[in-house]
Amino acid sequence: MINLIVNDQPHSVDVDPGMPLLWVLRDVLQLTGTKYGCGMALCGACTVHLNEDAVRSCVTPVHRAENQRVVTIEGLYHDVKNPLQEAWIQVDVPQCGYCQSGQIMAAAVLLRENLSPTDQDIDDGMSGNICRCGTYPRIRRAIHLAAQLQKEGGVK
Amino acid sequence: MSVTSYSRREFLKTGGMMGGGLLLSFFVPAGAQRLMKDTDPAAVFVPNAYLNVGADNTVTILLAHAEMGQGIWTTLPMLIAEELDFDWNKVQVEHAPPGEPYLHTVFKLQITGGSTTTWSEFDRYRNAGATARVMLVEAGARKFGVPVSECKTENGFVIAGDQRVSYGDLTDAASKLPVPASVKLKDPTEWRYIGKAKKRLDTKAKITGQATFGMDVHFPGMLIAVVVHSPVFGGTIKSYDASGARAVRGVRDVVQVPTGVAVIADNFWAARKGRDLVKVEWDMGPGEAVDSSTQFDDYRKLAGTRGLVASEHGNVENGLSKAARQISAEYTFPYLAHAAMEPLNCTVKISGNSCEIWTGTQMPGVDQQVAAKILGFQPGQVKMNTMFLGGAFGRRGSIGSDFVAEAVHIARASGKFIKMIWTREDDMRAGYYRAAFLHKANIGVDADGWPVAWQHTVVGQSIVHQTSLFGPPNKNAVDDTSVEGVKGSPYLETIPDHLVDLHSPELPVPVLWWRSVGNTHTAYVMETLVDELAISAGKDPVEYRRGLIKSKRHLAALDLAAEKSGWGSKLPAGRSRGVAVHESFGSYVAQVAEISIEDGRLRVHKVTCAIDCGLAVNPDGVRSQMEGGIIFALTAFLYSELTFEKGRVKQRNFHDYKMVRMNESPAVEVYIVDSKEKMGGAGEPCVPPLAPAVANAIFAATGKRVRRLPLKSSGIVKV
């Protein structure tokens, strides 16, 4: 049995310790907001937070998360008026939407560490996440907007 | 609508009819059915198959098309809202099941494709909304005891004087009224939704992990299946040994299906581990003969012979012989994978004499037919649930329903409720690609540099010839999807002597429509050749096009893109521009790319895009498609190439089939021509002009023409 804390909830899972965290989240805990895209840490669709760091859950064996805190897209928003979410809505970012969980998980770490990211900071922080629909220009705009909303003390 | 896109539509229309029983289907409005389970039927007003109104004033809209990113989850409800005047905050949206009312208004097949959704549903969905409104107003008028003429509607209420009643309170009364045979639609001057930017209705679900894609389907007792496919196309199993797979913890079953061996397990990880341990001895068949090192040599030989004539005027030999000069060129285009972010998957449950399927599909009716045939069922025994599509680009409109068929076979062979998941590698290597193409062109120009003769040969596999889905394939007929964009080109119509011919060689590699289909290669050839003619004539590329093109809509897009990009103005040192304009799917798109080459490496800084799509129902949706399509097209131009060695696809994942990422993504500016012309599409027309615009900018910077795609394999510029 492996114990882990996902979105503040404790879980015990009886799985192969080498099983990637992605498939524990998706197939065992039914947290399907975290997506499978490549299985090789190439696309970022599976990005989750492990102890506040953005990690690729498709290549993270679940034993690495043992007794650690995992946050998925389902647990990111405690407040629906989160600036990041609000910005994504204002800018109308998603198209197919499949990569957006991973994009937002990556953007959340970027914005936590950098209150006013430049375009270069966004390139550096977000280039690990592929969007096949090509929503990059809107993701960029949404991150700038979220940074601004954050500075203004959140969404009114 | 262009001749070429019209032909494609006609093909599908007539092809669909040739299929006979293909179109037979049953109709259950899913939304109504769902609501009626728990509620008094009188509490739901179902005026037609496209919408229903609940007692809580919620309007549920059923989409005849699938949401794959293009935004119709929002655009089709806007059409109904415009006429029904409901409360936009209370709209629910669902994908419709297969059914007669949801057949494409032109193709007569339930399909999302060809960038047709908005224009093809423009009347049907507005009529659906208007019909419901007439009935609700009638019910309200009776309730108030006033004439209909004294009633108006506002955000889900019927109002007469100081009396108001919600649509939800009129469901019972409205349900008892006859459905009007015809209704009057609003005058465009009264529109409150159409033509105004509306935010997407699916954003919140898609940014909180709540949107359910096919990949996310889960039910208790459901198992996961992963499949070993043949390493080459058409390979068959001689024998296999699954003892290793069966020993993996969590593996429940291993079954053989026509396309491979499926390992079924409690979860994906166990199924994949098991799959990797299955030993299969394959009979490879002729698939091993496919090899990228020789394919274009074969195509080149074909191009030296006369193919099927796609378009001919005058006498091209004569024209060429009389020309002052000739320009000749050969282009090659590789196979391309769609590589949607969501790998293909399909969930199937067979119980007794019924089957239920959950998947992201562009053709649920065809999938239903295919599943029923495999199971020996009537189509009505197969229930289809269309989930959100995590990208599609044509791949989820599979002519043979390949991924659905495979999942049905697995469920049938195992007797288990399964979700079949393809790994990224499976998705990349399982075929249905944009076909590889070779183009050869000889152009004769007069003393002033204007083209007077144009001979153009296209070689590449046919999408249409390889399937009997639409009836017996006619291999003597030109597949317009291979030549659209050359055939019907605005340049050719001004050239007295021209000939376009086509060879459609047969190979074991399955091919399919890929976002903008034939235009992916034809626009590139036409727009880079015209650029070349302009330069060789010593003329400005925009001016030269203006001198050739008669079509006002091409010119409107070209002029707007030229103006907004500052065409002709001085650029910062090291920057170059290139332009292209192309019509596809009824829309006219011009793009200007601004690039630089630093240390031999290309950087695309900015793309200015202008589109004339007629009325833009949701202008921000159109902008979004242009932005995304430009980046999608840039990936193909820079990187995308599937190659074969002894029939085996060499690429497998995003490290060797690269995607443009945030740091390579250009700034994109989109301008919509204020147009009253016929409506066209948005999802695909943004793609074709990008690659030639960038290639023309590369020529401006280097003096070199990129004739072998992708750019990374051209040897001209590093990427």
Image: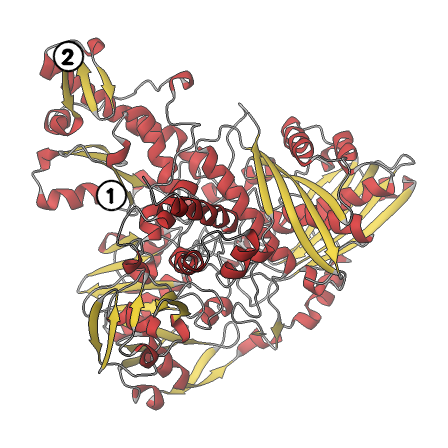
What kind of residue is marked 2? Asp
Q: At 75% across and 63% down in the image, what residue appears?
A: B301
In this figure, which residue is indicated by the disc labeled 1? B27
Disc on res. B259: none
Front tag of 1 and 2: 2
Q: For this view, does B239 lie left or right of residue B638?
A: left
Please state which of residues A31 and B632 is positioned toward the viewer in this rendering: A31
Q: Please, is residue B376 above or below residue B89 in the view?
A: below
Residue A66 visible in the shown view: yes
- Disc with the residue nearer the chain's start (1 vs 2): 1
Task: Check disc 2: other Cα within 10 Å, few if <14, some if 14-19, many if 20+.
Answer: few
Amino acid carrying mark 1 in the image = Phe
SS type, badge 1: loop
- Mark 2 lies on a secondary structure that is loop
Subunit of label 2: B
Q: Residue B72 versus residue B312: which sits nearer the camera?
A: B72
Pick the residue in front: B389 or B434.
B389
Give the position of the N terminus of chain B as an image quadrant.
top right
The CA distance from mark 1 to mark 2 is 41 Å
Q: Residue B631 location, x and y as percent?
A: 57, 51
